[in-house]
Image (spheres, rainbow, N blue to C red):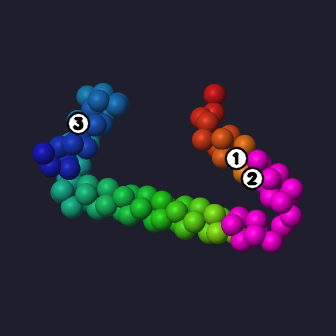
Amino acid sequence: MSHTIAAIEIVEAMFGENFSKELQSIPLSNDTVSRPIYDIAEDVEQQLFAMYIWTHCMIHKEALASKEMSPGLNIVLTTVVTVVNCIKMRPLK
């Protein structure tokens, strides 16, 4: 299945036959449709990589900070990090 046919089918399913016919009247090649898909995929990949780097750096900062603090403060920090991570993992209602 070409990208053009897939795009037309998606538009028809989401918006109806009138929009699908309108899209069919636009001359689209597979390159025209696949290029934005590739660009979106590349952007998502870059965002995920940036998020990975940020998370990785935060883990190292936390580990370095906990080495030089008092045991009592370390326990508090660990508890706070656990609670924050728990909150971040829960979906919003």
Mark 3 secondary-structure assignment:
helix
Residue 6 among magenta residues: no
- Note whether residue 18 is visible: no
Mark 2 secondary-structure assignment:
helix
- Note whether residue 51 is visible: yes
Q: Is residue 11 left or right of residue 44?
A: left
- Which percent across, then down, holds residue 5? 17, 43
- Which percent across, then down, holds residue 20? 25, 35
Q: Are marks 2 and 1 in contact (CB under 8 Å)?
A: yes
Q: Which residue is mark 1?
A: 82
Q: Is residue 80 left or right of residue 36?
A: right
Residue at point 34%, 31% (across, down): 14
Whole-angstrom CA distance, mark 2 to mark 1, is 6 Å
**Callout 1 amino acid:** Thr
Q: Nearer the viewer, residue 30 or 79?
A: 79
Q: Is residue 15 left or right of residue 73?
A: left
Which of pointers 2 and 3 indicates the residue nearer the eye? Answer: 2
Q: Nearer the viewer, residue 62 or 52?
A: 62
Which of pointers 1 and 3 indicates the residue nearer the eye? Answer: 1
Residue at point 21%, 42% (across, down): 6
Residue at point 26%, 55% (across, down): 33
**Which of the two discs, 2 and 3, labels the residue nearer the N terminus?**
3
Q: Which residue is mark 3?
A: 9
**Callout 2 amino acid:** Thr
Whole-angstrom CA distance, mark 1 to mark 3, is 46 Å
> What span is colored magenta in the figure?
62-80
Q: Which residue is mark 2?
A: 78
User: Label 1 crowding class (10 Å Cα cut-off): few <14, some 14-19, many 20+?
Assistant: few
Q: Are marks 2 and 3 in contact (CB under 8 Å)?
A: no
